[in-house]
Image (tube, grey):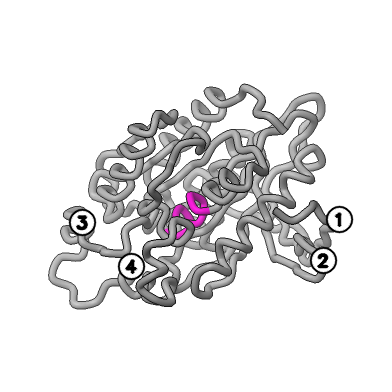
Amino acid sequence: MQPDQPSSLSSTLPPVAKPTEGGKAASVCSDSTIEVTKGQDVAVRMYGRKKTGQASPVVVHFHGGAFTSGGLDNGCTVASLLEGVGAVVVSVAYPLTPFPQPVDTGYDVLKWVHRNRTKLGGQGALVYLAGEEAGGNLAAAVGLMARDQSHPPLAGQILLSPMLDPCVGTASLREATGNATGCKWAEGWRNFLRCPRDAEHPYAVPAAAHRLAGLPPTLVLVGDTDPMHDEALAYAARLEAAGLQVTRHVFSKTAQWPDALLQTGPHECPCATGAQEQFRMFFEATRCPVPS
C-alpha cells in the first residue's frame, strides 16, 4: 500500500443542475479534477455538500456503460438519487481502458476520498462504494482491493445490477437479449479483459473471487427482468454464504432497468422512490463507525 499523498481539488466547471428522482427536483453538482497521487489527476463530479452539525455518508460512485462507453453524465441518475437521501457523492470518470487501469484509478480515488472524508461529509463521515452495471463491477473490485490492503475502511457497498459474469450466459441475460446476434456486454468484457487469464483475477471479475470474507455490508438492487438479475443475485448469495451482511431487493415491473439508470438528461427513472428508500435504510443500518 502506498502512503497517503497530499490531496488537492480544483473546480473545472461551475455547478450544473442534474435531474433527480425522475426530474422532479434538481441536483446541483460540480465537475472537478482531483490529484489522487502526485502527478495523477482524475476527473470527478461532486454531488451534495457537508451539512453543519452532522455527518453525511460519502460515496465513491462508478457509472455504467458496459465497459464500452459512458461518462459522468451517465452516472447522474444514481448519483443524484444517492444525494437525495443525504449522501455526498464523488462520481468517477474512470478510464475506458482494459483492466487493471479502471480498477486502480477507482482505488486511488477511494483513498483520496477517505483522506478528505471530513471535508466532504463532516466529522465522523463514513465512506461507501456504489456503482451500476459495469460500475457495479468496479465498485465490487475496489472493495476487494480495500479489503486486501486493509485500507481504507468501508462502511458498505451498493451494487445496482452489477455486471459480474464474463461468460454472459445466464438465463436472465439470454432472455433479455433474445435472438440478437450482438451483445454489448460480451463486447464490453472483450474490451475490459486483455487476455483469458484476466477473467480469473478477482479484481477484474469479483464474482470469480475465491475469498469474500472481510468485505463490508452490501446492498444489491436488481430488476425482475434485468439482464444482470441472475449474476447479481448469485454474487449476493456468495457474499451471504461467506457470512457477510447482505441486503438484496428485486424491483418488479422494471422493463427499463438498468438502462434508465444510465440515461442522460431529464427522464423518468423506474423505481426511483424505491431505490432511494433502499439507500436510506442501508445507510441507517450501517451507521456504526468503522475502524479508521
Alpha-carbon span between mark 2 and mark 3 = 42 Å
Pointer 4 or 1: first along the chain: 1
Q: Are marks 2 and 1 in contact (CB under 8 Å)?
A: yes
The crowding category of the residue bearing disc 3, from other C-alpha atoms within 10 Å (few below 14, some 14 to 19, many at least 20), is some
Q: Is residue 274 left or right of residue 47?
A: left
Question: Mark 1: which amino acid?
Answer: Pro
The mark closer to the camera, 4 or 2, is 2
Mark 2 vs 3: CB contact within 8 A: no
Looking at the rendered structure, which numbered label has been put on residue 247?
none
Query: 284 above or below 148?
Result: above
**Of residues 98 and 178, which is closer to you in this image?**
98
Q: Which residue is mark 1?
A: 6
Q: CA distance from mark 2 to mark 1?
A: 8 Å
Residue 170 got which mark? 3
Which residue is the site of mark 4?
Answer: 185
For marks 1 and 3, give the CA distance.
45 Å
Residue located beneath label 2 in the image: 38
Crowding at mark 2 (Cα within 10 Å: few <14, some 14-19, many 20+):
few
Q: Is 156 within the magenta?
A: no
- What stretch of residues is rendered in magenta? 134-141
Q: Can you give x and y, in whole percent of width and height, for residue 79 in the image? A: 57, 49
User: Which residue type does callout 3 highlight?
Assistant: Thr
Residue drawn at 69 percent across, 58 percent down: 16
Disc 4 vs disc 1: which is toward the camera?
1
Q: CA distance from mark 4 to mark 2?
A: 34 Å
Please say whether residue 139 is one of the residues in the magenta stretch. yes
In the rendered image, residue 276, in percent from the top left (x then y), is placed at 49, 35
**Reading the chain from its start, which is encountered first: label 1 or label 3?**
1
Q: Residue at x 20, y 65 (%)?
A: 177
